[in-house]
Image (spheres, coloured by chain):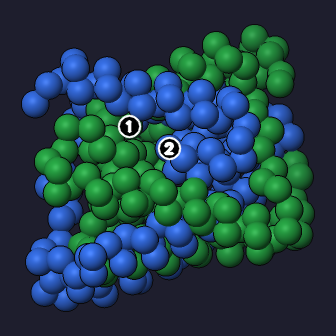
Chain colours: A blue, B green
């Protein structure tokens, strides 16, 4: 049980931040991505604010021997900028540009009851399923 | 260009909360708060790896509900794509984030905070591709919501 306290607190804070920042609204996201239209820069402050906090605090946390509630840190082992990364990021970017929703805002936005958000989440989970089938590890 | 003090302060505050949430998950559980990685692992992960992922996704929704309660307003969500584009976009987001091992949170927030060159490359690529896609849809094809 104890192990899950950090997960619960972090995810609620994360969802609160997504909703507060309006990252959850596809109109704001597309407005940010539409540099040739009426460009809306506010979402740069969302990632800017998050990285502003993360840049000094991530190294501080990683200096510890282990996390509070689990035996070890689990960090990505891959560092290569390979074709998989490039293709994956490009495909994600194209999909993000089409709808203006990325995974976090998709899940958090479900509580709005807007049917297109639910449709997006179902399609996204299906896309993850397609990946699993095609690249069965 | 539309720059509004009233709108960028909540964006900054929300971003800081997202950053703190990511730091908290790393500090407490040693894990990267990457939403595509967390949700993608819901299927096929060993059973001991499944509950925390489910809780995280549920917590995201609780957090949004908390904001509705605190602000006293419903969430402002204006979809920008119809059914077909939403389906296609969702498929690409799901597939692409798994292939590239991350999205706006995993590569964007956590990867940049870890000073990972791989994540920086991913962020530049997905931002660029998203910008080009919006440009093509809005200004070449002339589709507006």
Which mark, residue A103? Answer: 2
Dot 2 falls on a residue whose secondary structure is helix
Q: Position of residue B40 (x, y in %)?
A: 32, 41
| Residue in view at x 85 percent, y 68 percent | B72
Can residue B95 be seen here?
Answer: no
Q: In the figure, residue A96 lies in which quadrant?
A: top right
Q: Which residue is mark 1?
A: B97
Chain letter of disc 2 in the image: A
Q: Residue at x 42, y 31 (%)?
A: A125
- Considering depth in this image, is B126 or B15 the residue closer to the camera? B15
**In which quadrant of the rendered view does residue B77 lie?**
top right
Query: Please, which chain is the residue tagged with disc 1 on?
Result: B
For this view, does B144 lie left or right of residue A88? right
Q: Nearer the observer, disc 2 or disc 1?
A: 2
Q: Residue at x 60, y 34 (%)?
A: A118
Q: Are marks 2 and 1 in contact (CB under 8 Å)?
A: yes
């Amino acid at each position: 049980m104890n192990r899950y306290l950090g997960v619960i607190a972090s995810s609620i804070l994360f969802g609160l931040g997504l909703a507060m920042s309006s990252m959850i609204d596809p109109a704001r996201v597309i407005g940010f991505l539409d540099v040739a239209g009426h460009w809306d820069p506010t979402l740069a402050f969302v990632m800017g604010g998050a990285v502003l906090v993360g840049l000094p605090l991530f190294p501080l946390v990683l200096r510890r021997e282990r996390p509070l509630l689990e035996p070890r840190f689990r960090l990505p082992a891959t560092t290569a900028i390979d074709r998989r990364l490039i293709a994956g990021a490009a495909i994600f970017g194209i999909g993000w540009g089409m709808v203006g929703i990325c995974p976090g805002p998709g899940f958090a936005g479900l509580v709005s009851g807007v049917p297109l958000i639910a449709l997006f989440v179902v399609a996204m989970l299906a896309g993850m399923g397609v990946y699993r089938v095609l690249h069965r590890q | 260009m539309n720059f509004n003090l009233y709108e960028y302060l909540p964006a900054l505050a929300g971003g800081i909360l997202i950053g703190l949430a990511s730091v908290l998950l790393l500090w407490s559980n040693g894990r990267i708060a990457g939403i595509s990685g967390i949700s993608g692992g819901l299927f096929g992960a060993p059973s001991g790896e499944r509950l925390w992922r489910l809780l995280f996704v549920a917590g995201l929704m609780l957090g949004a509900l908390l904001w509705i309660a605190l602000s006293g307003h419903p969430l402002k969500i204006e979809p920008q794509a119809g059914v077909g584009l939403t389906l296609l976009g969702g498929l690409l987001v799901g597939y692409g984030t798994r292939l590239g091992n991350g999205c706006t949170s995993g590569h964007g927030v956590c990867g940049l905070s870890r000073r990972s060159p791989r994540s920086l490359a991913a962020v530049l690529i997905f931002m660029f591709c998203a910008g080009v896609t919006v440009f093509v849809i809005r200004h070449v094809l002339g589709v507006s919501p």
